[in-house]
Amino acid sequence: MRNIRKEAEPPGRSASERRCRYAEARAQLASLLEGESDPVARMASAAALLAEVLPQASFAGFYRAFGDQLVIGPYQGPPACLRIPFGRGVCGTSARENRSLLVADVRTFPGHIACDPLARSELVVPVHDAAGALVAVCDLDSREPGAFDEVDREELEAMMGLLFGRS
Ligand code: SME
C-alpha cells in the first residue's frame, strides 16, 4: 500500500511545493477538527492526514503523555512499542526536553528504540494543550535516511498547534 502511494508522489518535490501541500493539509485538518472535541478523534484524523501527506513515513502518529511515560495513541503504520519512558529513544527525549527532534540517521541517536528495525530517520514534535502542557508527541518515522528536514519540522509544529490550541 505504501509503495503504491509512493509511486503516486513525484520525487524530489521542492520546498515551496511541500509548503503548499502542508498549507492544504493544515486547512483540511482544521476542517476535519471543527466541532470535534474528543482528543483521540482529533489525533486519529491528524495521523491519517499525515500518512497521506508524507508517503515517505512508515509510521505517522502519536504517543500520549501520562506522568513520565508515553503511551501509544492513534497512528498509521506497523505495530509499534506501546509504552516509552520519558528520556528514552527519540520520542522519550523529545517529551522530556519538550522540544522537536529531527534525526536524519537513527543509528547515531543514543538509545534509539527500534520498534521497527528498518526505521532510518525520524521527526518528533511535542504537542501541547491550550494551557501549554505537554499532552503527546507526534512521531514520524521513515525507512529512508534523511526523510525529513527543517521544512517538515516547521510545518509539523504548525499543524500540531491546531490540534489542541497551542503548541
Ligand atoms: N522510534 C521511536 C520509537 C517509536 S517507534 O519507532 C514507532 C523512538 O526512538 O523514539
Image: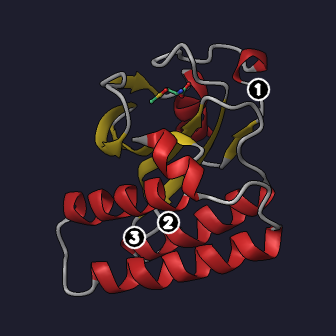
Residue 82 vertical placement versus 22 (above, below):
above
Q: Nearer the viewer, residue 105 or 98?
A: 105
Q: Residue at x 71, y 15 (%)?
A: 110
Between the C-alphas of marks 3 and 1, the distance is 28 Å
Q: Nearer the viewer, residue 162 or 85?
A: 162
Three-letter residue code for mark 2: Met
Q: How is the image coloured?
A: secondary structure
Q: Mark 2 and 3 residues: CB-CB less than 8 Å, in contact?
A: yes
Q: Is residue 104 left or right of residue 78?
A: right
Residue 4 vertical placement versus 144 (above, below):
below
Three-letter residue code for mark 1: Asp
Mark 3 — residue? 163
Q: Is residue 67 left or right of residue 58?
A: left
Image location of residue 99, percent across then percent down? 65, 49
Name the disc covering residue 160, or none: 2
Characterize the local packing of mark 1: few (<14), some (14-19) or many (20 or more) Cα atoms within 10 angstroms: some
Between the C-alphas of marks 2 and 3, the distance is 5 Å
Q: Which of the two discs, 2 and 1, sits closer to the camera?
A: 1
> Mark 3: which secondary structure?
helix
Q: Is residue 153 visible?
A: yes
Chain-order first, disc 3 or disc 1: 1
Image location of residue 153, percent across then percent down? 69, 57
Mark 1 — residue? 105
Characterize the local packing of mark 3: few (<14), some (14-19) or many (20 or more) Cα atoms within 10 angstroms: many
